[in-house]
Image (cartoon, rainbow, N blue to C red):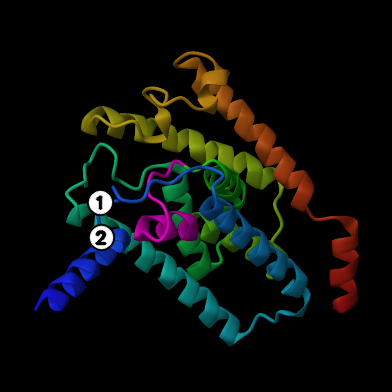
């Protein structure tokens, strides 16, 4: 009887570590588990680059794209199940209105449709936002909790989706796509701002800076840091364009294959 009680107690404790409120495991930046996530991104990105030339886009490739989109949908859906189960769902901070949340939704759309306008946003805003999230995560719960896996799987998934469409499917970022992404973001910001006022939220930090301190502290006071952040976004997007843009060698290779 005592053995059965202790076994049940351990099982509940184990479940708490995987699905509880996270009080038992606090995430620390640049810890072993953080470097493990960064390493996973580097390995998967490296493998994608190495084997991109030998990957063929056929029906099986389309199936893989849909399956990956499905895993992103399931993982994100489970996140909302989890925050609801622990009583933490709140309109002020639980809606998918952060930049990476929007990028995740559009990554799924890109995987299912291959739309090139959606690719532009996922490539520029998705990579820039998700890289920042992976290297400087706002995360409070550590491995092996579900939230740890959700956070890194979804952010890394955004980056890998953009790289897959660039390296494997031959999409390329353009200045026109960069401009379209900035226009879309500036059309999105006032909508998010109004939602913030209605629900008392601070999505995309449009009402105030994070109270815990962040890189936004270097960009000036409110509301000027929003303008500064847009300038930083343009610089990051230009860097990504320079790094991944279509080069003459790419065009010659494509013509030779034809």
Q: Tell me the CA gap for discs 1 and 2.
A: 7 Å
In this rendered view, identify the residue nearer to me: 163 or 44.
Answer: 44
> Quarter holding the N terminus?
bottom left
Residue 96: x and y in percent read 35, 48
- The boundaries of the magenta stretch are 138-154
Which mark is first along the chain, 2 or 1?
Answer: 2
- The residue drawn where x is 48% and y is 70% is 112
- The residue drawn where x is 56% and y is 66% is 114
Q: Residues within 10 Å of mark 2 (few under 14, many from 20)?
A: some
Q: Which residue is mark 1?
A: 21
Q: Quadrant of residue 53?
A: bottom right
Q: Is residue 117 above or below residue 135?
A: below
Q: Which residue is mark 2?
A: 16
Q: Is residue 221 above or below residue 177?
A: above
- The residue drawn where x is 88% and y is 69% is 253
Q: Residues within 10 Å of mark 1 (few under 14, many from 20)?
A: some
Dots 1 and 2: beta carbons under 8 Å?
Answer: yes
Q: Is residue 139 visible?
A: yes
Magenta stretch encompasses residue 145: yes
Magenta stretch encompasses residue 221: no
SS category of the residue bearing label 1: loop
In this rendered view, identify the residue nearer to me: 96 or 189.
Answer: 96
- The residue drawn where x is 48% and y is 51% is 103
Q: Is residue 116 visible?
A: no
Q: Is residue 111 left or right of residue 43?
A: left
């Amino acid at each position: 009887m005592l053995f059965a009680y202790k076994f049940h107690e351990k099982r509940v404790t184990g479940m708490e570590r995987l699905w509880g409120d996270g009080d038992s495991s606090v995430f620390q930046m640049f810890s072993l588990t953080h470097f493990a996530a960064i390493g996973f991104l580097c390995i998967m990105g490296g493998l994608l680059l190495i084997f991109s030339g030998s990957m063929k886009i056929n029906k099986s490739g389309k199936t893989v794209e849909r399956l990956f989109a499905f895993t992103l949908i399931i993982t994100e859906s489970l996140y909302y199940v989890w925050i609801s189960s622990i009583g933490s769902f709140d309109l002020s901070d639980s809606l998918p209105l952060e930049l990476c949340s929007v990028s995740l939704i559009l990554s799924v759309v890109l995987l299912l449709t291959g739309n090139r306008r959606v690719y532009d946003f996922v490539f520029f805003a998705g990579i820039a936002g998700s890289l920042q999230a992976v290297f400087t995560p706002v995360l409070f719960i550590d491995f092996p909790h579900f939230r740890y896996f959700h956070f890194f799987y979804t952010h890394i998934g955004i980056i890998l989706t953009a790289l897959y469409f660039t390296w494997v499917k031959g999409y390329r970022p353009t200045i026109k796509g960069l401009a379209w992404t900035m226009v879309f973001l500036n059309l999105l910001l006032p909508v998010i701002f109004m939602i913030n006022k209605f629900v008392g939220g601070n999505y995309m930090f449009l009402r105030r800076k994070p109270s815990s301190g962040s890189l936004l502290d270097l960009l000036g006071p409110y509301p000027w840091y929003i303008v500064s952040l847009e300038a930083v976004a343009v610089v990051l997007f230009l860097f990504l364009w320079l790094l991944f843009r279509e080069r003459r060698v790419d065009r010659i290779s494509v013509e030779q294959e034809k």
